[in-house]
Amino acid sequence: MTEEDFWFLVDALGGVANQRTAHELTEALKREGSVRVEEFVEILTEKLLRLQSEPLAETPVKDVNDPSSAALVPLMGDALNNFHLAVVAAGRTRFQRILELPSEATAHTWEFGESDELADAVCTAYESVTGEPWPGLPPGPRVTESNESKTIEEAETPWIRLALHGTSDIPVAYFDAAGDVVQMIQDDPKWNAWWSPAEQRDLDIEIEYASLAERNSFSARGGMVWVSLRRKISHFRGLNSGGLAHLAATDIESALSRTAASLGIPVPPQVPIPAHAKPPTPNRDAARARLDELRKRHRGSS
């Protein structure tokens, strides 16, 4: 894909990436095919990396939804990531201008609240064309708020992060337990020692519960690792808080084991288990399997 091709596709956004315009980019990318989508991502990542090298993190910028009296403050973290995407979505001319003169970002009123829809449009197009989910988190490097020169022990932000998604509400007991497990890992010196030799700085775990087929995916680039698990929502069925806590720990253990195998690093330590976690009993598994079979028969006869 050439530079001209890339910017032609970006122009489908009309200068702004949001829920309304992202659909146009998705449709344009779907017509290009999976290989071209991947080529688009490579160029998009390169553009975002170039923006990261500029002092935009120190530049206060205004969004169209800011109150007129709001004081402008420098962006960081997700807001800065979104702003970088907004600069790309604005098109080739403005992108080049901001690279040449970053201070001009302050003179323009942006719309970066939903600009991560640009990255989501790529994922949607890829899944539509290939039938497979995009491997990992949405494309593009992430700006973190930690000092990358620090060791894990000195870092102010976690090296391991967790994102939970579901087509319906995730049980609170599962949600809380998963967060507790990740926090215990982050606070444990032996886990920090396990991750320190890895070339990557950050590990993002994404767990999705849905009615779709189960799958795992792994991606590593730009000093970051993304491991994604999709599990069937039926796994929650019939579990009390102890069972849900045990399931959360088991899912995170699966993600970390896959990470170690994919990176070729030592087997991770034993995943901490919340005190109230209880594994499901064989009788409970048998009862759930029978119920699932009855549901299949019911659907088949209706």
Image: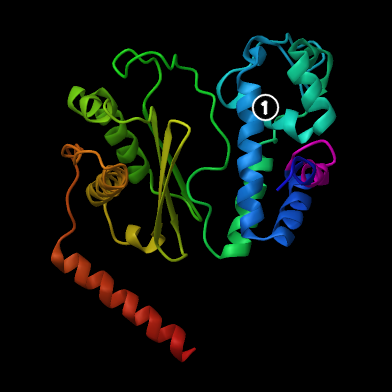
Circle 1 residue: 84
Q: Nearer the viewer, residue 293 or 183?
A: 183
Q: Secondary structure at mark 1?
A: helix
- Residue 110's x, y, as percent? 79, 25
The residue at the point 25 percent across, 46 percent down is: 257
Q: Position of residue 235 (x, y in %)?
A: 33, 60
Q: Quadrant of residue 111?
A: top right
* Residue 267 shows in this picture: yes
Judge from the rendering whether residue 99 lies leftward or rightward of residue 175; answer left or right: right
Give the class, few, some or many, for how many residues have Cα within 10 Å of label 1's Cα (few <14, many ≥20): many
154 w.r.t. 159: above or below: above
* The one of 73 and 1 positioned closer to us in this rendering: 1
State the image coordinates of residue 160 (x, y, percent, origin top left): 36, 31
Picture residue at 53% right of the left edge, 29% below the top: 142
Callout 1 amino acid = His
Q: Is residue 144 shown left or right of residue 63?
A: left
Residue located farthest toward the front when viewing the structure as drawn: 2
* Magenta-colored span: 7-18
Residue at (32% x, 80% y) in the render = 293
